[in-house]
Image: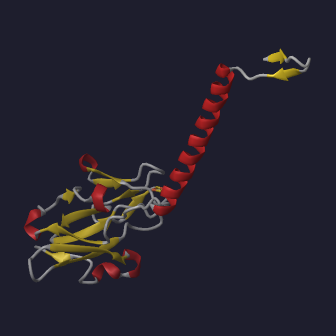
Amino acid sequence: MAEETTKGKTVEKVSRRGFFSWATMAWIGFTAAIGGCVTAWNRFLYPNVLYEPPMSFRVGLPEDFSPGVVDERFKESNGIWVVNNNGKLYALIAICTHLGCPPNWLEAQNKFKCPCHGSGYYKDGVNFEGPTPRPLERAKIFVDSEDGQIVIDKSQKYQWELGQWEDPESFIQVG
Ligand code: FES
């Protein structure tokens, strides 16, 4: 607001309302800047961490897995199926060997089917349809001698095409 003084000079006066609106805006800006700094500092102190499920885990006793059944309880949590088939218990890794999608177990069709490009696998993990060039992989599986629980270790994998499914640590004899 402009105002003339007794000496004939014109001075600009800031109204009280104008002053407070500027002060408010400055304060909001300052607060936002401080808030941004605090947020950035907190992200630095506590970075995002992805918690991967453990590679080695227990799934229960051998008698918990019925003959002929593909057990899906550990697919979501640990990325494996435990299969009791033809007298053997084995852990199939739920990753398609084409390009890595997670296949589904189709009970009615008695097969694993990948939703991405249609690869299909028999219950034992061997591929029979679609673009995948090889079977699913199996994880190390054994019975803990202390408590009788089945332990699965995904850090050790077994491939059919390398003859590794004959390895005694790639299955448990149950029948
Ligand atoms: Fe499974 Fe391609 S990723 S068929």
Is 80 located above or below residue 162 in the figure?
Answer: above
Position of residue 162 in the picture relative to residue 67 (left or right): right
Count of all numbered marks drawn on residues in the image: 0
- Image quarter hosting the C terminus: bottom left
Is 119 located above or below residue 108 in the figure?
Answer: below
Residue at image coords 43%, 68%: 134
Q: Position of residue 50 (x, y in %)?
A: 41, 61
Of the pair 132 and 128, the residue shown nearer to us = 132
Q: Position of residue 84 (x, y in %)?
A: 18, 65
Of the pair 9 and 19, the residue shown nearer to us = 9
Residue at image coords 47%, 61%: 47
Is 154 located above or below residue 101 in the figure?
Answer: below
Position of residue 13 in the picture relative to residue 126 (left or right): right
Of the pair 30 and 129, the residue shown nearer to us = 30
Of the pair 73 and 114, the residue shown nearer to us = 73
Q: Position of residue 20 (x, y in %)?
A: 63, 26
Position of residue 71 in the picture relative to residue 10 (left or right): left
The structure's colour scheme is secondary structure
Q: Position of residue 62 (x, y in %)?
A: 11, 70
- Image quarter hosting the N terminus: top right
Residue at image coords 36%, 75%: 160
Q: Quadrant of residue 85?
A: bottom left
